[in-house]
Amino acid sequence: MFVRVLCVAAAVACLLSSCAGRSQTESGSLATSFAPAKGLSSSNSYKKAEADSPVALTPVAWGRFNKPGSLSGRTLTASSLSDLKLADKEVVLTFDDGPMPKKTEKILSILDEYDVKATFLMVGQMAKAHPEIARKVVNAGHTIGSHTYRHADLQHLSFDAAVAEIEKGRDAVTSVTHEDAGFFRFPYLADTRRLRHWVASNGMVVLDVQVDSKDYFGVSPAAVATRTMSSLRAHGKGIILLHDIHSRTAAMLPALLTQLGAEGYKVVRLRHSNSSMMMAWLN
């Protein structure tokens, strides 16, 4: 049985290696990624960074020195897409495709160190293969959602097959975590108007993406952090797409969180209205 679980996890991990993009490549010099970011100092006179300013991947960022103490923002309760309204300098951290042994746990440890909460959109197969890690996510106070059962491209399925895939994924995550997976993200961000309507009418909130870290590319952690901040500066706020199945994501996360705090961003915690009503009932 243990061998079978390992085989399933390995197969799913291979499938997820390019979650939000299909057969893409990137290249280029990463030398500037290690240059000190503009305006990083202990003073309050931080100047607004340009869109192409590199992230501070100096020993200061990697070592968590002068880590921001006020990175955690408000809690936003949502029952529909219209509720997901962020103010300037507000971000939501989301992690797709897990849970993954060691990698998810490392990310949980870093998030705890910085006292921020994220939303984990779990693949049903992965949650069933690693139920103890899925429960660790919930027990740490993070929000969960689903990402279909086997990370299928729903645009290539019939409507009925796509709905079945969504339902099976949500049921798998809920059964493992004992918490309703109220948020949902389309694999590859491949949606249709009809499927979005079905998801909304069945009590789930679709999480779109404003800032794609593209951490599924085989590049350095420095490149991921720099690209993420560059995109975020251009938007000013938004939902950030990350993945908890890649080592490079965990490696760059402290630097990213340090930079977010240095530039005055707040990490918003999402809660689904169903979760809020469930907690009120339990209390």
Image: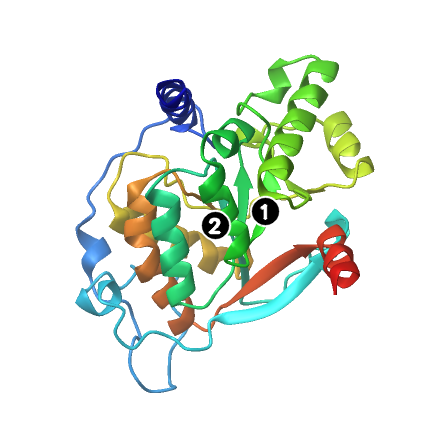
- Find numbered disc 1 in the image and state the secondary structure of the residue it sits on: strand
Q: Which mark is residue 144?
A: 1
Question: Dividing the image into 4 quarters, which one contains the N terminus?
Answer: top left
Residue 178: percent from left, percent from top: 64, 44
Q: Nearer the viewer, residue 276 or 188?
A: 276
Q: Nearer the viewer, residue 203 or 263?
A: 203
Gap in angstroms between the C-alphas marked 1 and 2? 11 Å
Is residue 239 at all visible to an observer of this figure? no
Q: Which mark is residue 136?
A: 2
Q: Label 2 amino acid?
A: Lys
In the rendered image, which quarter is residue 167 located in? top right
**Image position of 5 (left or right of 277):** left
Residue 57: percent from left, percent from top: 23, 60
Q: Residue furthest right?
A: 201
When the figure is inspected, residue 2 is found, relative to residue 225, above or below; the finding is above
Tag 2 or tag 1, which sits nearer the N-term?
A: 2
